[in-house]
Image (cartoon, rainbow, N blue to C red):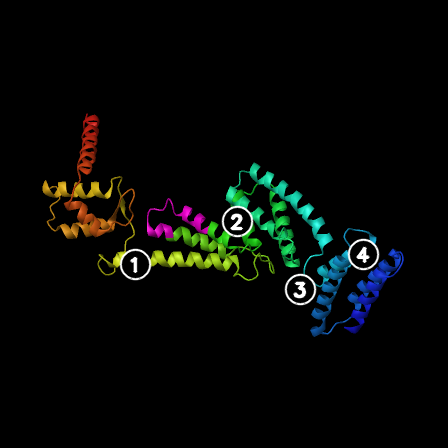
Amino acid sequence: MTEHKNTLKNLEQLLTGEGHRCEERVRAEVDRIRRLLMIEVFPAEAIEQVTQYYQQALVWLMDSLFSHEDECYCQLEDLFLFIERHFRSHADGRVKVPEVYLARVKKEITGNVRRIQARLVALHADQRLIHLLLDAHKIIHRPSHRVVSIRDLRYVQALQRALLDLVECPTPEAGVDEALRSLIYLVNYNAARVVSYHAEYYCSLLAGAETSAEKIERLSYALKKISQAHVRAGLCYNPLAPSLKDQLCGYLLDEIHHLERVQLLFVASGSRPGVVSTFKLKLETSVSQLAYLLRIFMETKVVRNDNVAELLRFLSKFVMTKRTENISVESFRIKFYNVESGTRDSVRSLLMDMVRYIDKASP
């Protein structure tokens, strides 16, 4: 370790010595350091220490001695990036990015962001997804008092490469939105706002589901896709949060277990032992209209069952209305005995429509 400290001290003296900097000597010293790092056999416990020492020392030299790029600065930057490439597994991702290098990379990334946004808009991608993915780039545009780390920059560069690959290729068969969600899983974009987006997305998947069984089936398929999603190793947006995959799998499992419990409780409330059915008759009427129709059928002897409570339990279990999947027995009972005038009018209109249909259909 002492040899490496002396090496960097010599490099600093070349850069800060009196008189004009000797670019050739700086280049030669950087080449010598590069060769030294490549040929030296480091003890397992020393390689991480040496790598991180070079990282911190080079960042300090670049930020302390340079406010713009010149030949000497470029030599230091090349050495810094060489260490980043060849010793990445031993490097410290928390080390700050050199200021001059960061300023140049920001310009490149900002230009690519405009290009990506224009292309995604042209592909009619979901605006929420576009906003989420572009918002991730903001971690390298932090205020001056916040450090932009090597990990932050690695993440944004990996995300941007994946986005550029996506927008420059033909539109995937599954659609651009599905491709963007797969990309989010790939780069482990584990921000809270991404989880919130997926919670809304999963709710939209259930919008057309008519039964609990269908909802469970849709959520189970979503869980299967998340579980099988490819995730790039060593990459994450927030290193302090669980992976996006773990968060989404946990959310989906909670939703599935809740629906299964509700389903079992509903079945247990009125079915014979061993009889489990998730099929329901779906009616266009409201609960109030259904309750009044049942009352009419009972009072006109169309329905011969006398036990109102049993009828209400049976229908609440096997019938759903246009707005209510699980009819409350108590609510059904109240509407059966307390009929509003608006309900009478709507049921009369419904029955008249049926009569007109019969008249029209008669030969």
Name the residue beneath numbered marker 4: 75
Indicate which disc, 1 or 3, sits on the residue closer to the N terminus: 3
Total residue callouts = 4
- The image shows residue 44 at horizontal and vertical percentages of 70, 73
For label 2, the crowd category at 10 Å Cα-Cα, with few meaning under 14, some 14 to 19 and many 20 or more, is some
Name the residue beneath numbered marker 3: 92
Per the image, label 1 sits on a secondary structure element best described as helix
Could you say which is closer to the camera, residue 121 or residue 3? Answer: 3
Per the image, label 2 sits on a secondary structure element best described as helix
Using the image, determine if residue 4 lies above or below residue 244: below
Residue type at mark 1 is Leu
For label 1, the crowd category at 10 Å Cα-Cα, with few meaning under 14, some 14 to 19 and many 20 or more, is few
Q: Which residues are magenta?
A: 198-215
Name the residue beneath numbered marker 2: 181
- 158 in magenta: no
Which numbered mark, 2 or 4, is in the foreground of this view?
4
Which numbered mark, 1 or 3, is in the foreground of this view?
3
Indicate which disc, 4 or 1, sits on the residue closer to the N terminus: 4
Q: CA distance from mark 2 to mark 3?
A: 29 Å
Name the residue beneath numbered marker 1: 264
